[in-house]
Image (tube, grey):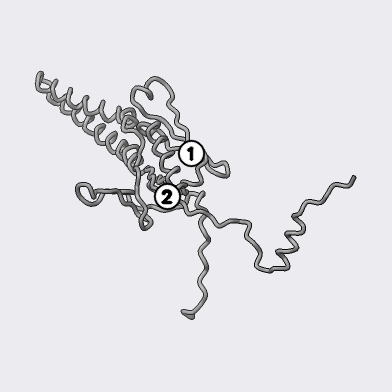
Amino acid sequence: MSSNAPQAQQAHNDPFTPRREHGGYWRAHKVGKGKNRHWVFRGQHQGEKVKAVLRKSKFFLITPALPFIASVIGLIVVGALFGINPSGDSFWALLEVIMLVLVIITGVYFAYNDLVLWWVETYIITDQRVLIWKGVLSPSREEFTVDKVVQVGSEQRGVISLLLNYGDVHLYLVGGKQPVLAKIHNPKGVRDLFEKVTDEFRRNKPAKEELHQEPKNPELHAALAQISQKEELPT
């Protein structure tokens, strides 16, 4: 087959459509030292500055971790009871094996099903874009520029969310799409940060050229000037 055969052109990705892209389990990491320490991530534009890297609140790991925590406590209790009453050594040994197996099973399940997913689900806010990374086996990245956001809202449901200070940040985009930064810490602070970022972006965005320019053709200019003149109303 000839090496000069035309290659299929890749379809242009719609920036509003999530696409399959992994980017590694460390979606963003810090580099540098001292005051020069800053966030970087794969696909970062030149001159683009990261304003915040967010994940779901750590308090959401407590509930999924309860079976693992209970198994660890059970193993400790069985070990303590075996030390107090070593007469039934075979019984306590069997219980220790059972509890150890439970610790391993619940620990692996929690690490994969909750801890890893919590870690890789990352929200990155820069001075130009918002990126939403999700998934392990089916990773995806959704991104959009901050000027596409027309409104930002925060929501905290229930007393626990107020006490632990977590909630959702809703982004309302041009076109009706509404991505959500779910269950993040300090949602009101994130909302205020995002409003500040969008204001800075719009102020720094170069002004567009005027839509109505004077025509270079003098005849066309004269015709337009004549048409634009107001005619006297008939009496």
143 or 136, nearer to the observer: 143
Q: Amino acid at mark 1?
A: Leu
Image-based side of 152 in relation to 224, left or right: left
> What's the CA distance linking mark 2 and mark 1?
15 Å
Q: Is residue 193 visible?
A: yes
| Percent x, y of residue 54 | 35, 40
Q: Which mark is residue 128?
A: 2
Q: Amino acid at mark 2?
A: Gln
Q: Name the residue located 73 percent from the left edge and 60 percent from the top edge.
A: 224
Label 2: element kind:
loop
Q: Is residue 141 visible?
A: no
**Callout 1: 10 Å neighbours few (<14), some, many (20+)?**
many
Relative vertical location of residue 214 with respect to residue 233 in this rendering, above or below: below
Q: Name the residue located 61 percent from the left edge and 56 percent from the top edge.
A: 211
Are the two marked residues, 2 and 1, in contact with CB atoms closer than 8 angstroms? no
| Percent x, y of residue 193 | 39, 38
Q: Name the residue located 32 percent from the left edge and 48 percent from the top edge.
A: 28
User: Mark 1 highlights which residue?
Assistant: 171
